[in-house]
Amino acid sequence: MKYPERLKQGDKIGIAAPAGPVDQKILKKGLEVLKKMGFSPVLGKHILAQDRYMAGTDEQRTEDLHDFFRDSQIKAIFCARGGYGTSRILPNLDSSIIRKNPKILVGSSDITLLILFLVQQCSLVAFHGPMVAGNFGNYPMPKSKLQFSEILLGKKAGKRLTANEARIFKSGTTEGRVIGGCLTLLCRSLGTPWEIKTRNKILLIEDVNEPLYKIDGMLWHLKQAGKFKGIRGIIFGEMVNCLPSKKSGGSFNEILNDIFSGSSFPVLTNFPSGHGREMLTMPMGVEASLDTNDKSLEFESCGVL
């Protein structure tokens, strides 16, 4: 794995929108958060473009990413928000540009597919974390802001994540490289050139606003595709607003019992790593230790040089 360079105070950060259209007012609030952290945000040429339910055409969104990777003055790329559209630009991305210009990229939700592309196709550590408008522009996120800054600046305090609110489904300790993201997008990766590779990995799974029967279906899809074979452990995010539909009951734990009752690896749930009001930043592709006893995930490094 290639590790991008750590950030420094005053660094220029490219703000890109590879997926859905961006609300200008919310983006402005998120940019103020970055400035208070000591970074200097630079907006992508097409950041406010809109084409139907996407932030501009496929060509525009691809162009902004390529431009930021090529620009030596830009030290990292922070995604503005999720939504939909990332899958459409993956065939257009030039992995040689990315490999020649490795740098930090942070995103989540629909950006899960871009993270998989960077980690698996480009061997570049990428960061599953808060987005400028989608997260920083909406919530105070005091814990997340601190850890976000620490890990990207390469401070050791940022690589140990703990969550007292997390719940233990299967106890244990394990080690492995971390990969994963939004459950909907993990399923969408199946059968594509950037299909998620889970063997010997600690798998992160989170989602938002999906009824439980759909969560059930997507987890069974991953299981039947063999994605839970040979994994080291699973961390579930908070699964925000993933509730029973009006016509059916059930619980998230019942789904987990059906799928993982015979599994031996540790499973931790309700970890602040998804669409909640706090969202800890994780370097994808980096070795980590999961310990359910103290509800911690500790990376061997911050994922930066």
Image (cartoon, rainbow, N blue to C red):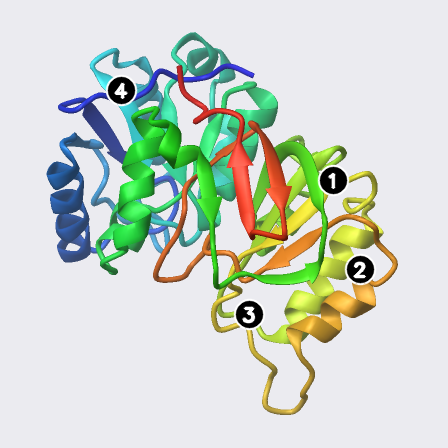
Instruction: Give the labeled residue for mark 1.
Output: 232
Residue lying at 56% horizontally and 52% vertically, measured from the top left: 295
Residue lying at 33% horizontally and 20% vertically, measured from the top left: 6
Mark 3 vs mark 2, foreground winner is 2
Mark 4 vs mark 2, foreground winner is 2
Question: Which disc is residue 260 wearing?
Answer: 2
Question: Which disc is residue 210 wearing?
Answer: 3
Instruction: Give the labeled residue for mark 4.
Output: 75
The single residue placed furthest to the bottom in the displayed view is 247
Q: Which is more N-terminal, label 4 or label 1?
A: 4
Q: CA distance from mark 3 to mark 1?
A: 26 Å
Dot 2 surroundings within 10 Å: few (below 14), some, or many (20 or more)? some
Mark 4–mark 3 CB contact (< 8 Å) = no
Q: Quadrant of the N terminus?
A: top right
Residue 95 position within the rendered picture, expressed as x and y whole percent measured from the top left: 50, 17
Mark 4–mark 2 CB contact (< 8 Å) = no
Q: Taking the image as drawn, is residue 135 in sight?
A: yes
Mark 3 vs mark 1, foreground winner is 1
Circle 2 — which element? Answer: helix
- Say what amino acid the circle numbered 4 marks: Lys
Circle 4 — which element? Answer: strand
Q: Quadrant of the C terminus?
A: top left
Q: Which is more N-terminal, label 1 or label 3?
A: 3
Mark 1 vs mark 4, foreground winner is 1
Circle 1 — which element? Answer: loop
Circle 3 — which element? Answer: loop
Mark 3–mark 2 CB contact (< 8 Å) = no
- Say what amino acid the circle numbered 1 marks: Arg
Residue lying at 38% horizontally and 28% vertically, measured from the top left: 156
Mark 3–mark 1 CB contact (< 8 Å) = no
Q: CA distance from mark 3 to mark 2?
A: 20 Å
Dot 3 surroundings within 10 Å: few (below 14), some, or many (20 or more)? some
